[in-house]
């Protein structure tokens, strides 16, 4: 980042690893809960949330030496969604229904 490679924080926020079922689950969570947060707050607030999370994760992950933090970004989105309406029933993959407060665990 300090050598003028300003794209590195954004690519590390987008890298989900090799193509497998875990990557498919992460993309599903990112789209599903990102859309829900955007519906509740609006596009500018969602963009500000994502940018602030990327900024904080860049700082934190560069201090501890973690090269990729896309899953942490998805976890932050899921956590924020689960705190808004914790007792609402929701459906995760494969038709399993749980209450929102259980989702981060």
Image (cartoon, rainbow, N blue to C red):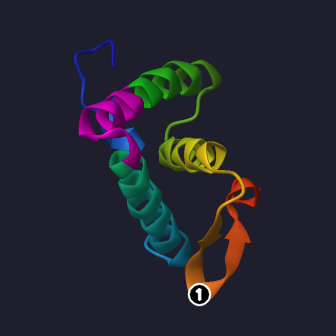
Magenta-drawn stretch contains 77? no
Look at the numbered disc 1 and give the secondary structure of its residue: helix
Q: Residue at x 76, y 59 (%)?
A: 102
Image quadrant containing the C terminus = bottom right
Q: Is residue 42 left or right of residue 68?
A: left
Question: Which one is in front, 84 or 7?
Answer: 84
Q: Nearer the viewer, residue 10 or 36?
A: 36
Residue located 65% across and 61% down the image: 88
Q: Which of the two residues, 71 or 39, is positioned nearer the viewer here?
A: 39
In which quadrant is the N terminus drawn? top left
- Residue 54: name its quadrant: top left
Query: What residue is shown at x 58% (from left), y 22% (from top)?
Result: 60
Q: Residue furthest bottom?
A: 94
Considering only vertical position in the picture, is 60 above or below 26? above
Res 99 quadrant in image = bottom right
User: Where residue 12 sits: x, y (%)?
Assistant: 40, 40
Residue 46: in magenta span: yes
The residue singled out by tag 1 in the image is: 94
Q: In the rendered image of this protein, does residue 102 appear above or below residue 64?
A: below
Residue 86 as seen in the image, left or right of residue 2: right
How many numbered circles are shown? 1
Q: Position of residue 44 (x, y in %)?
A: 25, 32
Secondary structure mainly formed by the magenta segment: helix
Query: Over which residues does the magenta segment extend?
Result: 40-51
Image side of residue 48 versus residue 86, left or right: left
Q: Position of residue 66 (x, y in %)?
A: 58, 34
Q: Quadrant of residue 103?
A: bottom right
Spot the residue most to the top: 2
Q: Is residue 43 left or right of residue 35?
A: left
| Residue at the (49%, 63%) spot, across then down | 29
């Amino acid at each position: 980042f300090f050598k003028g490679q300003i794209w590195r924080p954004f690519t590390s926020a987008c890298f989900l690893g090799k193509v497998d079922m875990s990557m498919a689950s992460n993309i599903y969570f990112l789209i599903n809960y990102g859309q829900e947060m955007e519906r509740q707050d609006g596009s500018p607030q969602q963009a500000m949330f994502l940018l602030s999370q990327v900024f904080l994760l860049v700082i934190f992950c560069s201090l501890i030496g973690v090269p990729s933090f896309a899953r942490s970004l998805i976890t932050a989105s899921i956590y924020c969604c689960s705190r808004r309406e914790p007792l609402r029933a929701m459906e995760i993959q494969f038709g399993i229904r749980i209450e929102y407060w259980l989702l981060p665990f």
